[in-house]
Image (cartoon, coloured by chain):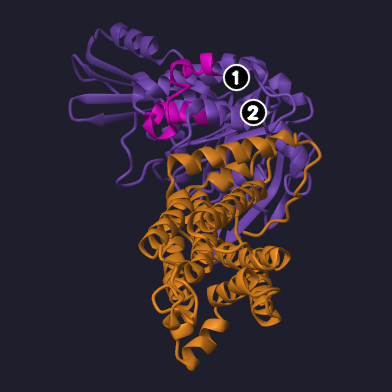
Amino acid sequence: MRTRWSLLPASTPRAAFGTIVRNEARLGRRQPVALGIGVVAPTLLLVIIGSVYSDNKHLKVLGGLTYVNVYVPILIGFSIAALGLFGLPIPLASYRQQGILRRLSTTPAPPAWVLAAQLVLNLCLAAMELALLLVVAVAGFGVAAPKSPGGLVLALAASMAALFSIGLWISAIARTEQAAGLLAVAWFFPMLFFAGTWLPRAEMPKPLLDISNFTPLGAAVQAIQSALLSGFPPIAPLLVLAAYAVIFGALAVRFFRWE
Amino acid sequence: MNARASIGENAPAIEISHLRKVYGETVAVDDVSLSVAEGEIFGILGPNGAGKTTTVECVIGLRSPDAGSIRVMGLRPREDREALHLVVGAQLQASALPARLRVGEILDLYRSFYRRPADVDELVGVLGLAAKRTAFYKSLSGGQKQRLSIALALIGRPKIAVLDEMTTGLDPQARRGTWGLIEGVRDRGVTIVLVTHYMEEAERLCDRVALIDRGRIVAIDSPAGLAQRAGGGQRVRFVPSGPFDDRLLTGLPEVKGIERHGRHVVVSGPGELVSAVILALAAAGLTVSDVQVESATLEDAFVLLTGRHLHGEGMVPRP
């Protein structure tokens, strides 16, 4: 049922939010699914790709770029998508399914604080992982420093907003943890394909590339890659990401249920 | 009447009038009015699906009534929910806690929600969870989970604790242990609303009981008072040493009814039934054997008032 909640009840100690975040972090450590696919996997993949293609050849099939050049933006997108689509919604769906949010709603702590705690945690993990990927790429595999640091920050922020909104929408409509997992998988792999994970965007035929430009990770990779290699990203992918953020954010707010 | 009746003269802790809640076509709660006095253990007893849980969920603000009004310590559960959460602690049916949190972590979490929480050390001591503070929630037994759930209902020092089916799924020993605990909580001045379908639990713990069936209150009284309504007190079953005229016993003020089943005679009525019957028969030169005495129960009251059994087919056996 739908209830209007006060998000900041006067009588609830603000320190309770810190305790909730700490507990969510504990749970994330004890069942490290998000940590595994959102942080460990992309880092490992970058190390593997960087080591295999350590000659850093600029290849024609990659549009004149090196493998590491191509895969850094893709792995950044991979990490953001994994944290947004798995890390964020799956615990929330499971808490709703088990009645944990319902139990919480009989206490002075608003259940929205759990959602906020998950957002904070996954955004922090994403920020840390993106910094790590960039450091490994630049220091370990000779990638040049980002051409447009400001543009990169903007592209990353827009990407996180888009993917995390989709994750929130999943947590809003999935009635069970399993349903949330299935929805996340159904979005994750097609998005990875259009991001160029298996067929680099430079190799995609025009119709495929057109579709890619309008997918969340396709747009994310486009914007991030420009910021890294060329300069301030074009406006089109940023607008695509903003549109995903607004549309799915609104759908999430509209359909979210606490029980 | 009983000592607690006088408490009811204060402003009630909970006042429900003409509560109604409908889910689609189903009327879960039809017209429930009751008031819970401060300091009492008030039982809500009825079969599954009678509307017990819906009623208390409206009281703790989880559901909004379709009609009627509720005041909890003068607060409206939906509109004043912030204040309500400070005075009411709830133990809900079918709500879990994160499997991979430790007992101590869960207690610290819930403790952090309140400005003036209860003493956790004392609480875990009273609830027998002291040795389990580092155990993961998923490793607890059913009884330990229930006790933790009760601890969380009490951690904010509520004035009222609402406990929904707190002993369902517990073995008889754990159930009795929980009863002692609840009495201890009441002795600290907490008003308790106990939802149950175990009549033994209601008989043992409750000062007053509301019998509820199909969304309506059937009767509200003390457990003894309800049992009195069910044919008043006792049934005595015996085999007489020889034939006698029913009028020998029906003439007694204690005897309300007499039935014969073959050699057995069953007499029911209030008061000192056993001695009255035996003395009357002895005066007629008869002795009795195979004497069995049954007290009328809440179950009898429920059957009498609704024509139905408290426990339907396929239910858990009574403890």
Residue B120, numbered label: 1
Badge 1 crowding class, 10 Å Cα cut-off, few under 14, some 14 to 19, many 20 or more, is some
Any magenta on residue B133? yes
Q: Which chain is purple?
A: B
Residue A164 is situated, as x and y percent measured from the top left of the image, at 60, 62
Q: Which chain is orange?
A: A
Residue A184 is situated, as x and y percent measured from the top left of the image, at 46, 65
Segment tinted magenta in the rendering: B124-149
On screen, residue A56 versus residue A167, left or right, reads left
Badge 2 crowding class, 10 Å Cα cut-off, few under 14, some 14 to 19, many 20 or more, is many
Give the residue at x 57% y 42%. Answer: A103
The answer to whether one can see residue B95 in this image is: no
Vertical relation: A234 (above or below) B237: below
Circle 1 chain: B
Residue B41 is situated, as x and y percent measured from the top left of the image, at 60, 25
On screen, residue A122 versus residue A63, left or right, reads right
Give the residue at x 44% y 37%. Answer: B100
